[in-house]
């Protein structure tokens, strides 16, 4: 089958593209290499993909793609391209989020109208929930994001839904809960914590460290995303959480044990836009997609640490 993966040079998109190629499919990756983090990292993410003759990369923004040509004979679209990150989404930077996350998604959905695609799987986020929903978070709770980033992810999710309702674009949204593992973005927590441990630098902790996250190993997120391309109900939303909900303080302890270097913590004020807790109810994904996360936190953290060693991130 032919698949399109937007954001293919990114953390999750590169793993997803590899998984599709391993299953025998052909992949067109689309990525504009935004400057949110170093291009060098994205080139590393793509290294294996570039050796596969069934992989093509289009280095272009969503808005500039020749969609009719790219979507010819395509069965699946995996839409992961976005401006990620909660903390930078305030102020003037919000524009970057609306262009990439909302307008980019709308352009893609317009291009899908009337095309015989099997599924469009959209990478949404637990950030859509905010702090006002009961735990564990269920897909039918009323989302009230606490960050501008979350607002753009929710807007794009709702665009997916309304293009399904009005034009039968078979869009499915996956609400990923904090994804980690090899290639994790350099702005994300575990990446920064490992670096701090190995450099013997203090970690800045926003809040009291007792906030919780439901961490999801990248292969579990990818498995669920691939399953959604055949089994996801068009128009539906799915929570994808790894089942490892822990307090940040426990993560620091674990990272200290794995690296053999206890972390020094520098506690500061909570940041606007950060959620207090995330915890996924994954019953819907279990039923519809057969989702069952298989990598628990310590195993996944060790895999990420090993990757960081091999990628030379501690020697740079
Ligand atoms: N990593 C997580 O924990 C997490 C959690 C929830 C949701 N998500 C969502 O999953 C997706 C992938 O996240 P990631 O962590 O792999 O991020 P990432 O930044 O590593 O990957 C996103 C990629 O999209 C590309 N991109 C951005 N805007 C583009 C545009 N307009 N046109 C073409 N390419 C563009 C970037 O260059 C980047 O390579 C995003 O949609 C993100 O919002 C991620």
Image (cartoon, rainbow, N blue to C red):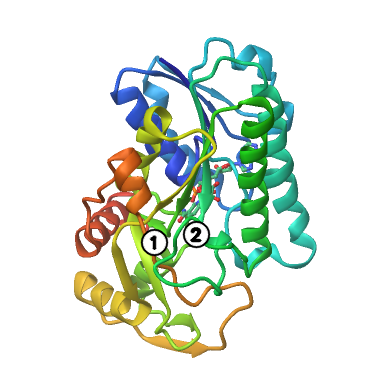
Q: How many marks?
A: 2
Q: Which mark is residue 280?
A: 1
Foreground residue among 272 and 292: 292
Give the structural element (helix, strand or loop) at label 1.
Answer: loop
Residue 149 position, x and y percent, is: 64, 59
Q: Residue at x 27, y 72 (%)?
A: 255
Q: Is residue 250 above or below residue 217?
A: below
Where residue 212 sits in the image (x, y, percent)? 39, 75
In the picture, the quarter occupied by the C terminus is bottom left
Q: Is residue 249 toward the left or the right of residue 297 in the image? A: right
Q: Secondary structure at mark 2?
A: helix
Q: Position of residue 107 (x, y in %)?
A: 72, 32
Task: Tell me what residue is drawn at x 32 percent, y 73 percent.
Answer: 246
**Front one among 308 and 230:** 230
Which residue is painted at 36% across and 26% down in the image? 20
Are the residues tagged 2 and 1 within 8 Å (C-beta)?
yes
Position of 201 relative to 123 (above/below): below
Q: CA distance from mark 2 to mark 1?
A: 8 Å
> Looking at the figure, which quarter contains the N terminus?
top left
**Relative to 188, residue 5 above or below:** above
Q: Of the residues under marks 2 and 1, which one precedes in the sequence?
A: 2
| Closer to the camera in the image, 204 or 298 | 298
Q: Is residue 77 visible?
A: no
Question: Which circle, 2 or 1, is nearer the viewer?
Answer: 1
The residue pinned by badge 2 equals: 126
From the Cβ of disc 2, is ligand 1 less than 8 Å away?
Answer: yes
**Residue at 57% across, 88% down:** 269
Image quadrant in which you'd find residue 315? bottom left
């Amino acid at each position: 089958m032919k698949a399109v993966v937007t954001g293919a040079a990114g953390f999750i998109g590169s793993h997803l593209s590899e998984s599709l190629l391993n299953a025998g499919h052909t992949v067109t990756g689309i990525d504009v290499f935004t400057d949110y983090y170093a291009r060098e990292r994205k080139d590393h993410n793509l290294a294996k993909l570039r050796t596969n003759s069934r992989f093509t990369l289009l280095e272009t923004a969503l808005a500039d793609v020749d969609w009719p040509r790219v979507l010819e004979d395509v069965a699946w679209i995996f839409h992961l391209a976005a401006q990620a990150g909660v903390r930078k989404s305030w102020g003037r930077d919000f524009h970057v989020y609306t262009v990439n996350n909302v307008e980019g998604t709308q352009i893609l959905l317009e291009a899908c109208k009337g095309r015989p695609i099997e599924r469009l799987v959209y990478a949404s986020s637990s950030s859509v929930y905010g702090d006002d929903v009961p735990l564990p978070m269920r897909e039918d709770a009323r989302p009230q994001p606490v960050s501008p980033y979350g607002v753009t992810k929710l807007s794009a999710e709702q665009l997916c839904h309304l293009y399904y309702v009005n034009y039968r674009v078979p869009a499915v949204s996956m609400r990923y809960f904090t994804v980690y593992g090899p290639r994790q973005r350099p702005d994300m927590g575990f990446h920064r914590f490992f670096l701090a441990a190995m450099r013997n630098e203090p970690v800045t902790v926003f809040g009291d460290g007792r906030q919780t996250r439901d961490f999801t190993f990248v292969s579990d997120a990818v498995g669920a995303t691939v399953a959604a391309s055949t089994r996801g109900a068009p128009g539906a939303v799915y929570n994808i959480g790894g089942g490892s909900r822990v307090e940040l303080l426990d993560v620091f302890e674990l990272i200290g044990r794995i690296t053999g270097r206890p972390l020094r913590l520098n506690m500061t004020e909570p940041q606007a836009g950060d959620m207090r807790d995330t915890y996924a109810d994954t019953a819907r994904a279990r039923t519809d997609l057969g989702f069952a996360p298989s990598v628990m936190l310590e195993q996944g953290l060790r895999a990420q640490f090993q990757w960081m060693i091999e990628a030379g991130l501690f020697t740079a």
